[in-house]
Image: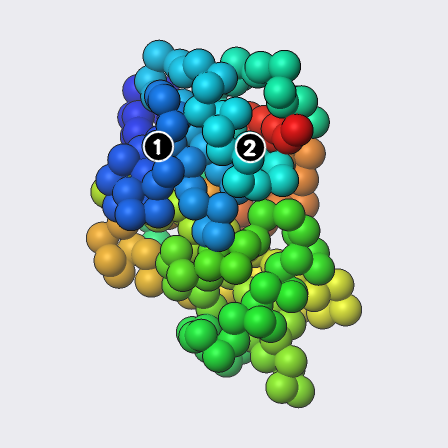
Amino acid sequence: MPGTHEKLDNPVWSALSETHSEHALVFDRTRFYHPDYCPFGGMAPGGATSTGMDAYADLIDHFYIVGDHPPISKKLVLKKELLTLQMILEKPIEQEIRETIVRLGPEHRTALIQLINLVQPGYFRSKTSTMGNYFGIFKEGALVAVTGERMRMEGYTEVSGVVTHPEHTGRGYARQLITRTVQHIQGEGQIPFLHVATTNSRAIGLYERLGFEARLQLSFWQLGQ
């Protein structure tokens, strides 16, 4: 979708300049989420110097710059590049929800953090769940699958934390949770978007079947000392 939804070209910068500005730490020409919320940073349009990244590195063990290749000082090491596909959904999902889906609250935070870090370690922090709404499926009292919201800006909300416990995969939980999350986002008048590793063909196929369309490829650059 070239030429449309331009603020998604630089999603972290856009979110921290607007709806999530209260979570922002601003160093030089770079905006970062406070480490308790999310290990992501975004550079100003036109780029930034390494000064802000050096300052943020003193607060967190590792972090990601989302977007163009960042300038890197001698203080930091580029650990890896995670290439993602940014996908967007501009129509309702036609999907039946059969499971009982629970909107998660503070009392579920520990179980949520444990489940997501079991499957996707390194991204979910102590206050990530407060950035948006999270929905879950329980079996025999245990949280076994979740989906929620992360980055948010005017007009757009990111679908994130699409996680199912390894012992409960293949039962359609992710599909139903994404549907519930998207319904909530669209009910607020927002457009859902997400990021998925370009190598994760299974997840990309699921998102495509639900109606998401690829918009662009976006790099998450992992940096640390």
Question: Residue 75 at x, y = what percent?
Answer: 62, 20
Q: Is residue 93 visible?
A: no
Q: Is residue 116 left or right of residue 13?
A: right
Instruction: Pick the residue in front: 153 or 61.
Output: 61
Q: Which residue is mark 1?
A: 26
Q: Is residue 90 above or below residue 184?
A: above
Instruction: Pick the residue in front: 34 or 59.
Output: 59
Amino acid type at circle 2 is: Ala
The kind of secondary structure element at disc 1 is strand
Colouring of the image: rainbow
Instruction: Pick the residue in front: 44 or 147.
Output: 44
Q: Which residue is mark 2?
A: 57
Q: Is residue 55 above or below residue 209?
A: above
Q: How many marks do you count on the picture?
A: 2
Q: Residues within 10 Å of mark 2 (few under 14, many from 20)?
A: some
Q: Is residue 62 above or below residue 140?
A: above
Q: Is residue 217 above or below residue 154?
A: above
Task: Find the residue positioned furthest to the bottom.
Answer: 140
Residue drawn 71% across the image and 60% down it: 118
Amino acid type at circle 1 is: Val
The kind of secondary structure element at disc 2 is helix
Q: Residues within 10 Å of mark 1 (few under 14, many from 20)?
A: some
Q: Is residue 148 left or right of residue 26?
A: right
Q: Which mark is residue 1?
A: none
Q: Quadrant of the N terminus?
A: top left
